[in-house]
Structures are given as C-alpha cells and as structure tokens.
C-alpha cells in the first residue's frame, strides 16, 4: 500500500513540476526552432525570386506572416536570456511568466488565422464556391484567434503560476484543439477536391498525387504540433513543455504557406509542354471553346479566376487549345489541376 501511495505521489509531482524544473525543455525547443526560422527566411527569399508577379495582397500576406514570426523569434530569444542569464537560479523569477513568453501565443494565433484563411480561399476556388465550407473554416480561424487573444490577456494578468485561476488551462487546450481541427479540415478538403479530379491519364494523376502528398505533409506538420501542445497542456499545465511546442507552431504555419507557394514551380513544370497534357476528343458532346493560338489561352488567364472560365471548370466543359497547325482539347481534369497549381500567381 505504501509503495502504491509513493508511486502515485511521484506521478503527481512529476506532472505538477514547477516551471523552473522544465526550463531544459524550453531551451531544447528554442534550439530546434531557431534553425527552422532560418529555413523560413530561405523560403521567403526563394518566393520573391520565383514569383515577382504575384498579387500585392498575397505578397503582403507573406511578408506579414514572416514579420510576425520574426517578432516571435526575437521575443522567445529575450525570454531565454531572461530566464537563463538574468535570473539564473532565481526560483521566484522562474515561477513567473515574462511578457515575451506570453505575447507569442497571440502572434501564433494571428499567423494561423492568415494562413488558414489563405487555404480556405483556395478551397473555395477548388470547390466551385462552396460557401458553407469556406465559412466553417474561416469561423474556426477566427475562433482560435479569439482564444489566443484570451490566453495572452489572461497570462499578462496572472503571470505567476500560483495565481492562475482554476480551469484556465482549459482555454489553452480549447485553442489548440480548434487549431488542430481547422488544420485537419483544411487538409482533408484539399485532398478530397484534388482526388475527385483524378482521371485515367497517368500524367494528370501524377500531378494530382504530388499535390496531395504536399498537402498532407503541410497539414500534418501544423496538426501534430497543435495536438502535441493540446495533450501536453492537459497533462502538465504548470510546466514549460507547452511553451516549447508553441515555439514551433508559428514557424509551422509560416513554412506551410511558403512551401505551398514555392511548390508551384515544380508542379507547373508537369504541364509546361502542351503535348504532355492529356487530350480528349470533341465527340464528348460538350460545348467547346476553340482557341486558334497558344497566345490566346495562357496559364495566367486561368489564375485570374474570371467568372466565365470558372463556370466552365464547374460544368466540366472542355476547352480547345490550338497547338501549331492542329487544335487539340485539354481535358477538364488537366485544366483543373493546372488551375490549382497556378492559383494566386497573378
């Protein structure tokens, strides 16, 4: 009986260990997340080199997310210096949350809302204006932003762990749960709308499969980090483990956005040569729009999202494209994937 009681006590104190006992976890999180920030900067450089003609609002979104993540990196650097250098071995200070550790969750929420809205708009286009799905994702994005704001305000009001109101950890857990749920919905939606456009053409299916794999990888990154933070906050709410995982969350969103945009170059190359795009016969009995030269129908015209062209995609009409002395017809599946690759490029 005594042995059982001692084991329970050990589990309890391990779970409720003071924050200063888990500073090592926060240091590891800082050391691992810093190189990821370097990768983010590299991806930002590649983006502006590859896509100088992207829309202004997209460039503003990319730069805004990067600036927010830069602010977060500066703040967590200050927090590490505050705990490990200025207040080394000061248990009282180590039991109090410094401001530079409390503001990053709000910044992560802003980054998450921007990136999730970006993908919500992409799903809106791919799903032929599915307003319900678009509204659900945007509502969840706003909800997690609101909870992030509440978490930051609560932390600034009660920086000492001993003064934290009972049940406040549930607000943090709800925030992480909504973040993970939103990312999962986005990933599944993108994969679904890509999958249903598969055809019997090997070339088209190859491009679709690559886009699906990229979508899953991006969604897993953010979802796993959010779920890990959710579980950690429930299991050890008074430790630094949750903060260590938060160091990754904002960088996960930033890298997800940039990798999705930068991957357009590789995916677009799959359809660079008109002869590589599967053709269909005019005997399909659908209304065809014939174009007599390559210059009259370009990839950029797809990305601008004109209403008439979008309706043709929605109805599955085949678009004829002139190639030299002959006129072939792109399959709707091929053009749909091309539209997905070229979305937001102009």
Image (cartoon, grey):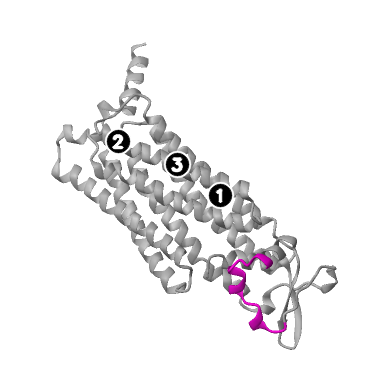
Kindly indicate whether the residue at mark 1 contacts the one at mark 2 (C-beta within 8 angstroms).
Answer: no
Instruction: Pick out the residue farthest to the front.
Output: 307
**Drawn side of residue 6 relative to residue 198, left or right:** left
**Drawn side of residue 291 relative to residue 173, left or right:** right
| Residue pointed to by mark 2 | 155
Q: Secondary structure at mark 3?
A: helix
Q: CA distance from mark 2 to mark 3?
A: 16 Å
For marks 2 and 1, the one nearer the N-term is 2
Q: x%, y% of residue 315? A: 74, 61
Kindly indicate whether the residue at mark 3 contacts the one at mark 2 (C-beta within 8 angstroms).
Answer: no
Image quadrant holding the N terminus, namely top left
Numbered marks: total: 3
| Residue pointed to by mark 3 | 144
Q: Nearer the viewer, mark 2 or mark 1?
A: 2
Instruction: Pick out the residue farthest to the top.
Output: 1
In the drawing, what numbered circle is on residue 186?
1
Q: x%, y% of residue 340? A: 60, 63
* Quadrant position of residue 70: bottom left
For marks 3 and 1, the one nearer the N-term is 3
Check the image and report above or below for 341 versus 165.
below
Q: Is residue 235 among the parts visible in the rendering? A: no
Count neighbours of disc 3 (C-alpha within 10 A) and say few if under 14, some if 14 to 19, many if 20 or more: many
**Drawn side of residue 210 relative to residue 13, left or right:** right
Point 32% across, 37% down: residue: 153
Q: CA distance from mark 3 to mark 1?
A: 15 Å
Point 27% across, 48% down: residue: 76
Q: Secondary structure at mark 1?
A: helix
Instruction: Pick out the residue farthest to the bottom.
Output: 325
Count neighbours of disc 2 (C-alpha within 10 A) and say few if under 14, some if 14 to 19, many if 20 or more: many
Q: Which residues are magenta?
A: 292-308
In the drawing, what numbered circle is on residue 165?
none
């Amino acid at each position: 009986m005594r042995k059982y009681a001692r084991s329970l006590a050990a589990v309890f104190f391990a779970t409720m260990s003071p924050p200063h006992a888990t500073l090592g976890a926060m240091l590891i999180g800082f050391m691992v997340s810093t190189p990821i920030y370097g990768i983010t900067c590299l991806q930002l450089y590649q983006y502006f080199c590859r896509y100088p003609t992207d829309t202004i609002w997209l460039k503003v979104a990319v730069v805004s997310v990067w600036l927010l993540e830069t602010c977060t990196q500066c703040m967590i650097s200050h927090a590490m210096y505050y705990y490990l250098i200025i207040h080394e071995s000061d248990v009282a200070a180590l039991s109090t949350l410094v401001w530079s550790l409390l503001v990053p969750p709000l910044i992560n929420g802003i980054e998450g809302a921007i990136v999730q809205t970006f993908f919500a708009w992409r799903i809106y286009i791919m799903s032929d204006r599915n307003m319900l799905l678009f509204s659900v994702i945007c509502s969840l994005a706003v909800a997690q932003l609101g909870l992030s704001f509440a978490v930051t305000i609560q932390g600034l009001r009660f920086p000492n762990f001993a003064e934290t109101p009972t049940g406040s950890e549930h607000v943090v857990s709800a925030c992480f749960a909504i973040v993970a749920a939103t990312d999962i919905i986005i990933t599944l939606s993108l994969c679904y709308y890509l999958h249903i456009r598969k055809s019997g053409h090997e070339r088209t299916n190859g491009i679709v499969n690559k886009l699906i794999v990229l979508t899953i990888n991006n969604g897993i990154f953010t979802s796993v980090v959010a779920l890990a933070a959710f579980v950690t906050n429930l299991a050890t709410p008074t430790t630094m483990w949750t903060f260590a995982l938060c160091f990754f969350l904002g960088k996960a969103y930033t890298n997800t956005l940039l990798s999705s945009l930068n991957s357009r170059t590789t995916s677009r190359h799959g359809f660079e040569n008109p002869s590589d795009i599967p053709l269909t016969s005019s005997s399909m009995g659908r209304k065809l729009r014939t174009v007599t030269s390559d210059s009259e129908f370009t990839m950029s015209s797809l990305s601008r999202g004109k209403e008439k062209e979008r309706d043709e995609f929605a109805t599955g009409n085949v678009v004829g494209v002139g190639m030299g002395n002959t006129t072939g017809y792109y399959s709707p599946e091929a053009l749909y994937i091309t539209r997905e690759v070229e979305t937001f490029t102009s």
